[in-house]
Image (spheres, rainbow, N blue to C red):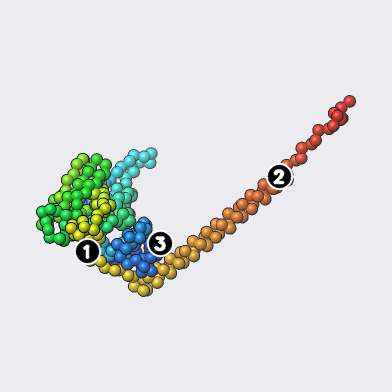
Amino acid sequence: MQRRERRRDDDKTHQIGDWIPKTQLGKMVAEGMVSTMSAALATRLRLREPEIVDILLPEMADEVLDVNMVQRMTDSGRRVRFAITVVVGNSDGFVGVGRARGKEVGPAIRKAIDIAKLNLIELRRGCGSWECGCGKPHTLPFATEGKSGSVVVTFKPAPRGVGLAVADIPKHVLRMGGIRDAWGFSKGHSKTTVNYGLAAFEALKRSTEVRVTKEQLAKLKILTGAAEVKAIALDSATAAKILERSRRDDRIKEKVRAVERMLSRKAEAAGEEIADDADAAEPAEEEPAANGGGQK
């Protein structure tokens, strides 16, 4: 099993410089209307471009949880593919898990990282343990449970200083999200790394869907997202280039749609002409002679 934590600032800078935003959220980020990841998720627009995460969370790291090789016999021989499971996070309130398949390990890892960024969630942290009263967002605010396949994972708040009392796979997911203390329990076939990681991520995701009152927010010291919110904005030159490429791409798409509409109209007109010619070419039916004319 491979576990690697990587930060690729050079690659991200290169990708952002060549990025052409195609979604509404991407254009809002490029124009500076959205400057934080919390604001991007608050728009309720789906994340469809990983470059948005690269811009708003430049400190994002990734870690490979599992590399699984699958072999299949075909008529042409043995076919080998790799299934990669990756977790990404900034260790401060944002985490995502992704899984991808590919013929080669490198491209599959990059694809899994992009999918994990698109699955990013904003965690809730707090001081939910009855044994602790520090008031700092170091653990979960309440117990939560997630399931994937046969694996069921339960996380409970722990007092400060306990650490992550969980197995290795969910420990990486919690650490990437910024959880420092937690109790963990699991049921099922937890040796299945993929289901174990997905169940841990599902548990964290469910904790964000629980309704809490203002009194609970104050009592449990619940913090949603990053502790230190940093507004990120592209420099004017990069933003101008990205927006210009986006406008150029939109103009090209509009021209393509106009050509498609023109061809469609021509095809319809040609079809009508062919139908008219076919109707004109049909021979007229002869009327029968009256009173049996022509017979002797």
Instruction: Write down the quadrant of residue 140 in the picture.
Output: bottom left
Query: Amino acid under label 2?
Result: Asp
What is the distance, in whole Å, between disc 3 and disc 2 at their CAs? 50 Å
Query: Residue sitting at 18 percent across and 44 percent down?
Result: 186
Query: Residue sitting at 29 percent across and 62 percent down?
Result: 38
State the SS at label 1: loop
x and y percentages locating residue 185 in the rendered image: 17, 45
- The disc, 2 or 1, on the residue closer to the chain's N-terminal end is 1
What is the distance, in whole Å, between disc 2 and disc 1 at their CAs? 76 Å
x and y percentages locating residue 166 in the rendered image: 15, 49
Labelled pair 3, 2 in contact (Cβ < 8 Å): no
Residue at the disc numbered 2: 279
- The disc, 3 or 2, on the residue closer to the chain's N-terminal end is 3
Badge 1 density bin: few <14, some 14–19, many ≥20, Cα 10 Å: few
Q: Nearer the viewer, mark 1 or mark 3?
A: 1
Query: Amino acid under label 3?
Result: Gln
Badge 2 density bin: few <14, some 14–19, many ≥20, Cα 10 Å: few
Q: Please tell me which residue lies in front, 225 or 177.
A: 225
Against 76, is 265 above or below? below
Residue at the disc numbered 1: 227
Task: Answer left or right for 292 relative to 158.
Answer: right
Residue at the disc numbered 3: 24
State the SS at label 3: helix
Count of all numbered marks drawn on residues in the image: 3
Query: Amino acid under label 1?
Result: Ala
Badge 3 density bin: few <14, some 14–19, many ≥20, Cα 10 Å: few
Q: Please tell me which residue lies in front, 241 or 70.
A: 241
Query: Residue sitting at 16 percent across and 48 percent down?
Result: 184
Labelled pair 1, 3 in contact (Cβ < 8 Å): no
What is the distance, in whole Å, between disc 1 and disc 3 at their CAs? 27 Å
- The disc, 1 or 3, on the residue closer to the chain's N-terminal end is 3
Query: Residue sitting at 69 percent across and 45 percent down?
Result: 278
